Image: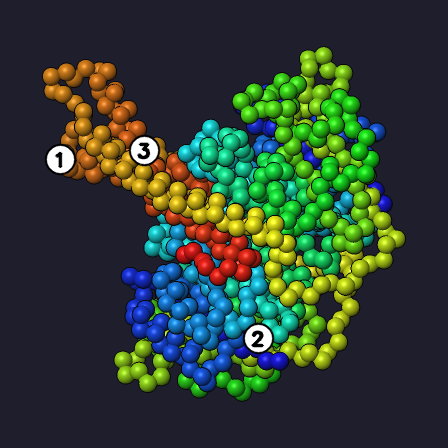
Amino acid sequence: MQLRILTLNIWGVRYLAKLIDERLHALVTHLISPEVNYDIIGLQEVWSKTDYLYIRDHIKNIYPHSYYFLSGLFGSGCCMFSKHPIIGVYEHLYTLNGFPHKIQHGDYFAGKLIGLCKILINNHVINVYNTHLHANYHHVVPKDIYLGHRICQAYELIQFIESTSSADTTHLTILLGDLNLTTNDLGFQLIQGVLQFHDCFLDRINKDIFDPTVGNNGFTCDIPGNPYVSPHPHHGEGERIDYILYRGRNDNVKCLEAYPTLHKVPNNLKGLHYSDHLAIYALLEINDEIPENKKIKPLQNMEITDEKTRTLLSDACIIVEETIQRIQRQRMFCTFGVFILVFILFSINGNPLSNSYLYTIFTIIKNLFCLIGIAVSIWFICLGKPVERNALSSIQNAMRIRLQAPHFTY
Amino acid sequence: MQLRVLTLNIWGVHYVSKLISQRIQALIEHLIDPDTNYDIIGLQEVWSKKDFIYLRDQLKIIYPHSYYFLSGLIGSGCCMFSKYPIIGVYEHRYTLNGFPHKIQHGDWFCGKLIGLCKILVNGKIVNVYNTHLHANYHHVIPKDIYLGHRVCQAYELIQFIESTSSADTTDLTILLGDLNLTTQDLGFKLIRGILQLNDSFLHRINKDVFDPTVGNNGLTCDLLDNPYVTPHPYQGEGERIDYILFRSRNDNVKCLEAYPTLHKVPNNPAGLHYSDHLAIYALFEIDEKIPEKNSISHKNIEILDEETQNDLRAACILVQQSIQRAQRHRLFCILAVMILIFFLFSFNNYLFTILIIFKNLFSLICIAICIWFIGLGKPVERNALSSIHNAMHLRLRLSQFTY
C-alpha cells in the first residue's frame, strides 16, 4: 500500500504576508489537479479560519475529511486534510510559547500545539501529528531568547507522541510540520534520540527523484530565489526546518521518495510562489506481507539506552535551567522598571507657569504610557513570569525523571 | 498481588485553611505508622511546595518515590507518593479553568491538570492518574458558572487517559482524586461511559468493611460533623466527589475493599480532623494467574452506547451555551469600557483630589481588565470551548464544526 503525504507552511498571516488569496488559490488548484494524488495533507500558519474554510470547501470532493486545531487567540494555524476517515483527534497545547510583549513576533498569542489525527486507511490506524514550533528569529544561540521555550516544546512533543502512539493499535506514526529546528539543533536531536523516527528526506530510497525547479539539497526555508524571504546575515543557502518523520510499528514501512516541492507556481506570469516555505512531499510504502511483530519489549525502565541521548537530555536540562535563572533577572528588571515608571508618573505633571496645549497632551500620553507599563510589569512579576518558571521547572523535572536523576526543582 | 491506594484532598490553602501544620503532621504520623501499608498515595491541594517537600522528606523512608506536578501560579496541588519506582510522568493542563477576576475562588491561577505517574509494580505497569477538577461553589445548575469549564475538563481528562493508557503496556489504570463531580453529574457519566472505568466504592466485594468512625455511605465532602465545612443550603448529608476508579487490561483486578477514611485524628483532644474532605482507601487484588488476553484489533473506534451518546450530546449543548455566554460577557465588557471611559472623564472638577485619584485609578484598572477580556481572555476561552466542542462532535461522528 502506498501513502502520499504533503506538509506546507502556507504563510497565511493576514495583513502581513503578501498575496495570500492568490497563493491559496494556486495551492487549491494544485491540490485538485488529477495528477496530484496525496492521501494526507498537513498545513501550518492557516491563521484565518475563513482561509481554512475556503481551502476545505474547494478540495472537499477529493479530501472529504479535515480538521482544524483551534487554540489560543488566533491559532493554532495547524490543520489536516485527508482522503481517508479521521477517526479521532487529540492535541497538546505547548505550555511555553514566547512572550506577550513581543507583539512583533506574535507566537505567544498563536496557541501553538501538536495536533494528532488518527486516520484509518485500509484497516491501518495511522497517527499523523502536525505541529509548528516557536519561530527562530535570531538564528544564533546567544541571541535566541526563545531557545529555552523551543527546547521545552520539543520535549512536550516527545512526551505527547510517546504517550499517544500505542504500539498495539498504531500501525504507523507520522510527524510532519514546521519544527523550526535544523538537524543540528538540540531539540531535533532529542526528538530523534528518544522517538527514533526515520527522516523521510534522509532515508528515502530513490535519492535521484526530486523537483527540478527546486534542487536536491532538501532546504525548505530561506531559499535564495524566494521573493517573500527577507535576507539576513545568517542566511546561507537556506535551512531544512520542515520535515516528514515516520516510524512503522512493524518496521514494514519504507520511504520511496521525499523532496521539497511547491516553490514557483507554474504558468504564472507575475512570479507567484506558493509560500515563503517549501512543501515537503513523501511517498511511503507499507508492506503488508511482513508478519506482525507481536513481541512488545517489557518496559522495565524508562532508561535511555544510548549515551548520546543521555548527553543531549543533560544539555537540555542545562538550557532550561539557564532560562529559569534568566526569569528571576527579568522579574527584578520589571520591579526596577515599576519603580522608575511610578517616579516618572508623578513627575513633570504640570507647571503652573506654562500650561500650554502641547504640555497637557504630553502629560496625558506620558501618564498613560506609564500606567500601561506599570500594569504590564506587574502582570509579569506576579503572573507571567512565575507561571513561566513553573512550566520550565515542570519540564525540567520530567527530563530528570527520564534521566533517573532525582533532583527536582520546585 | 495486592495494592493499597489512598487519595486525599488535604486542604492546604495557606492563610485560608485552618491548622495546616497540625493536620499535615497528623497525616504524616498516619502514613508512617507500620499498620497502614499503602502502596500508592495521591494528594490534592498541596499548594505550598514547602509542604510537599516536608511531606516528601518525612515519608521518604517508606515512600521513596514521589512527584509533584508543577503548574500555573500556585499549583497544581497534585502530587504522588509511591513505594514502587515511578518510571515516567506526564500531565495535561486543563485549557479552561475558571476566570481570573474570581480571585475569591482562585481556580484560574491554580494550573489544574491531570497528572500521570507510570509506576512499576512487580513487573506490571500501573498508570496512576491524579486530578482535581474545578470546584463547585454554587451547587445548583443555573447558578453554576463553571459548569461549562468543568465539563470540558472532564472531556480533556477522558481524552488524556484514553490516549495515554495504551492497551499494550498498561496493565492497570487507576484514576484517583477530587473530581468535584457527583455520580449524577454529566461529567462523571461521560468519564464512566467513555472510559469504562470501575468505581471502586461501588464495585467493592466486601461491602461490609468500612471505617467505623465515618459510616458506610461513601460520602467524602461537606460532612455534617466536619468542623472545617461551612454549611450551605444544598449540603444534605454530604457528597461523594472523591474517587478511586480503575480498569485493568486483562480484567484480572478486583477491588476487595473501598471506603472513605481519615476523618477525626485519633487521640487528639483538640478535635483535629485531617481535612475538610475525607480520604478514599481502596484495596485491589491483581490475579496474575489469568492468562493474557489477545488484544482486539481496532478496526473501528469504539461505538458508544446509547446512554453515553446522549450524555455526549448534552455535553455539546452545554459547551455551546458556554460559548454563547462568553460572547455575552464580551459585549458586557465593551459596554463597561464605554461607561468607564465616560466615568473617567467626568466629575473631575467637582470632587476632592483624593477621590478623583481613586476614581480614575479604579476606572483605569477596570478598563485595562475589560480590554484584556475583550481582546485576549474571552476569545481564547471561546476557542478552547469550540475546540472541545469539535472533538466531542467528531466522536459523535457529526460533521458540524464551529470556527
Q: Which residue is mark 3?
A: A373
Q: How many marks?
A: 3
Question: What numbered label is drawn on residue B352?
Answer: 1
**Residue A206 location in percent, x, y?**
82, 35
Residue at the left extreme, as displayed? A353
Q: Which residue is mark 2?
A: B200
- Does residue A160 appear in the picture of this structure? no
Identify the residue shown where x is 39% and y is 45%: A325
Residue at the front extreme, as displayed? A307
Which residue is more in the foreground, B11 or B213? B11
Q: Is residue A40 shown above or below A299?
A: above
Q: Amino acid at mark 3?
A: Gly
Query: Are both tags, 1 and 2, on one chain?
Result: yes
Circles 3 and 1: CB distance less than 8 Å?
A: no
**Whole-number angstrom distance, CA of label 1 to CA of label 2:** 65 Å
The local crowd at label 3, few if under 14, some if 14 to 19, many if 20 or more residues have their Cα within 10 Å, is some
From the image, state whether disc 1 or disc 2 is nearer to you: 2
**Residue A394 location in percent, x, y?**
47, 53
Residue B400: quarter of image: top right
Q: Amino acid at mark 1?
A: Phe
Q: Earlier in the sequence, mark 1 or mark 2?
A: 2
Q: Amino acid at mark 2?
A: Ser
Identify the residue shown where x is 49% and y is 56%: A397
Circles 2 and 3: CB distance less than 8 Å?
A: no
From the image, state whether disc 3 or disc 1 is nearer to you: 3
**Whole-number angstrom distance, CA of label 3 to CA of label 1:** 27 Å
Q: Secondary structure at mark 2?
A: helix
